[in-house]
Amino acid sequence: MINVDFDFYNLNEDVDQIAAKRLLRQHLSHDEELVDVHPLASLILAESSRLGAGSSIKTDGEESDPWAILAAVDLDRNKDDPALKPFVSYLAGRSKSATSISSQLLEPSKTALIFSLRMLNLPLPLIPPMYKMLLSELTDNGAEFDHFILWGRGYRLEGSEEGMGLDLHDQSRGKKKKKAGKATSSAPALAAGSFAYHPEEEFIDKVAEEVHTYPFQSAQQRDEDAFGVEQFGRLVLVNRDKLLSAIKSMEAAAAEP
């Protein structure tokens, strides 16, 4: 059992650059060589500044590395930007069978791409405040989006893995203030099945217009003797009102004793 104090901060283009690149590589997994994360990280942080929206979670002051980043990028405005276009092309290539998602990626209409980048096992009570602040800040600054595409990862387990620190159902209690919070986390063994790495995605999936999973292009083909967690990419299309309802469900789940 570990007790940690978490602080919420606005994203900082100077301080958060290195961590953003590292978290992008982590989320790209096997496909990290297919996307140049340097300009992408810069664009994510610059968009956060331009839109006046997005948060980081840190434990050692504003100058420290973030444990989590939540940010939005305006797809309508930036789809042809050299920093974003290769990433959009990569996602579109992995989601050809997901007609609604691929359509919004290639021909967006009031659509934002949400980057939820973080270390594993952050407690669920920390996440709804980040999403609420993001949507509120977007609205307050006149950036109205009808749809959001969430990019993330998932994994499959056979049920024999233990103590890997990947518990999706850890809803350890935590208290959040505007720029600070406290939470507790633990990592029991996992059951067999397919899961999203981020627990809030389970709530968003329930109200999404489309959920698409895709294999990593550069991952080696697995056989029956393969060891370790099999990972895959995830794309979720959700409209703004449904995302707000999912956030309320997250809050209710986090508040349960």
Image (cartoon, rainbow, N blue to C red):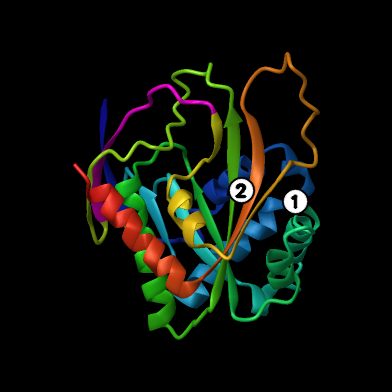
Q: Is residue 229 visible?
A: yes
- State the SS at label 2: helix
Residue appearing at x 42%, y 21% in the figure:
189
* Residue bearing the label numbered 1: 35
Q: Where, quadrant-wise, is the N terminus in this rendering?
A: top left
Which residue appears farthest toward the bottom when viewing the image?
142
Region rendered in magenta: 180-192
Count of marks overlaid on the render:
2
User: In whole angstroms, how far apart are the C-alphas of marks 1 and 2?
Assistant: 9 Å
Q: Work out whether residue 15 can be spotted.
A: no
Residue 67 is situated, as x and y percent measured from the top left of the image, at: 43, 44
Where's residue 176, x and y in %? 23, 53
Q: Is residue 34 left or right of residue 68?
A: right
Mark with earlier residue (1, 2): 2
Judge by depth and name the residue closer to the eye, 27 or 42.
27
Residue that badge 2 annotates: 24
Marks 1 & 2, CB-CB < 8 Å contact: yes
Q: Residues within 10 Å of mark 1 (few under 14, many from 20)?
A: some
In-front residue for pair 24/59? 24
Of all residues shown, which one is farthest toward the top? 225
